[in-house]
Amino acid sequence: MEREGIIFVVSAPSGTGKTTLCKELIDFFPDLRQSVSFTTRAMRPAEKAGRDYHFISASSFAMMVDKGEFAEWAAVHGHYYGTALAPLDACRQNGCDVLLDIDFQGAEQLRRNYSHAVFIFIVPPDMVELERRLRLRGTESDEVINNRLENARSELQAGDWYDYLVTNDDFDRALSKLKAIVIAEACKRSRIPFSVAELVGLSV
Ligand code: ADP
Ligand code: 5GP
């Protein structure tokens, strides 16, 4: 009997550094998989379909919603984003740990159905630095950046119920904290379906 896979949910206002941190985390833990979301937003130049997102039309997205194919979905910054239910459940049942980079609305939906999931909120050092990072990334127009900064205010209010808060000031320090969370969660007694005696092969 394997232990259930752990669902790690990471949220943060756009520009905080969540995508960069998640990529490093996935590279560090060979057994941790990134969940690939569906979105109706346009692909950015550096992105790859199927790796960063499944890019689909609004009508295809609506069809998936109607068929109940999402574990969660939400409208974020004027586009739709969602996590497919079937691969998430398969991963969990097969003992595979999975990392979801989703917004707070999606996280709130998952909290209702996945009570053992781990919710991590990444906090920017301050609003000035958040804006600097968004502008430096250079992937959005001024209008989109302003909209994301406006949304950040309400997103930050939603961070209080998460299990863990990690401030992304120094990148390496934030990454170390995320690694510590992943390791500690895998060691939790309640997640291990064996007695200590069984773990060491002691016959009882
Ligand atoms: P998000 O996924 O939260 O929208 P990104 O991962 O795209 O954010 O990061 C936004 C920008 O900030 C990127 O250019 C990234 O390289 C940079 N960045 C991430 N973390 C830090 C950090 N700790 N210090 C300075 N810049 C950072
Ligand atoms: P971006 O467009 O910058 O890639 O992502 C914008 C926001 O959408 C981020 O906050 C990101 O976490 C969120 N997001 C990405 N995928 C999903 C998803 O499947 N569901 C939800 N609810 N939010 C998502």
Image (cartoon, rainbow, N blue to C red):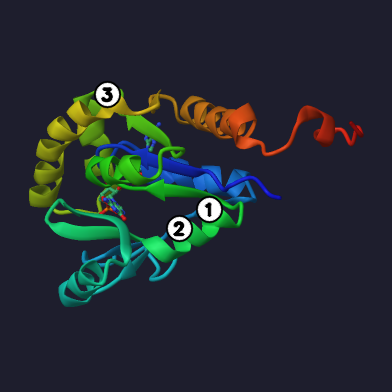
Q: Which mark is residue 164?
A: none
Q: Dot 3: within a 10 Å radius of its alpha carbon, few (fewer than 14), some, or many (20 or more) residues? A: few
Residue at disc 1, secondary structure: helix
SS for callout 3? helix
Q: Are marks 1 and 3 in contact (CB under 8 Å)?
A: no
Q: Quadrant of residue 128?
A: top left
Are the residues tagged 1 and 2 within 8 Å (C-beta)? yes
Q: Residue furthest right?
A: 203
Residue picked out by circle 3: 160
Q: Give the residue type that dot 3 points to.
A: Asp
With respect to residue 58, does 18 lie above or below? above
- Residue 52 seen in the current view: no
Q: CA distance from mark 3 to mark 2?
A: 25 Å
Image quadrant for the C terminus? top right
Tell me the residue that label 1 is attached to: 92
Q: Is residue 158 left or right of residue 101?
A: left
Is label 3 or label 2 in front? 2
For disc 2, the marked residue is 88
Residue at 44% from the left image edge and 25% from the top image edge: 170
Q: Nearer the viewer, residue 47 or 106?
A: 106
Tell whether 78 sits left or right of 9: left
Real-space CA distance between mark 1 and mark 3, rounded to the nearest whole angstrom: 26 Å
Task: Determine whether the beta carbon of the residue marked 1 sits less than 8 angstroms from the nearest atom of ligand 2.
Answer: no
Q: Residue 41 location, x and y as percent?
A: 21, 64
Relative depth, front residue between 200 and 187: 200
Q: Nearer the viewer, residue 163 or 93?
A: 93
- For residue 61, what is the image quadrant? bottom left
Residue at x 11%, y 56% (from the top left corner): 78
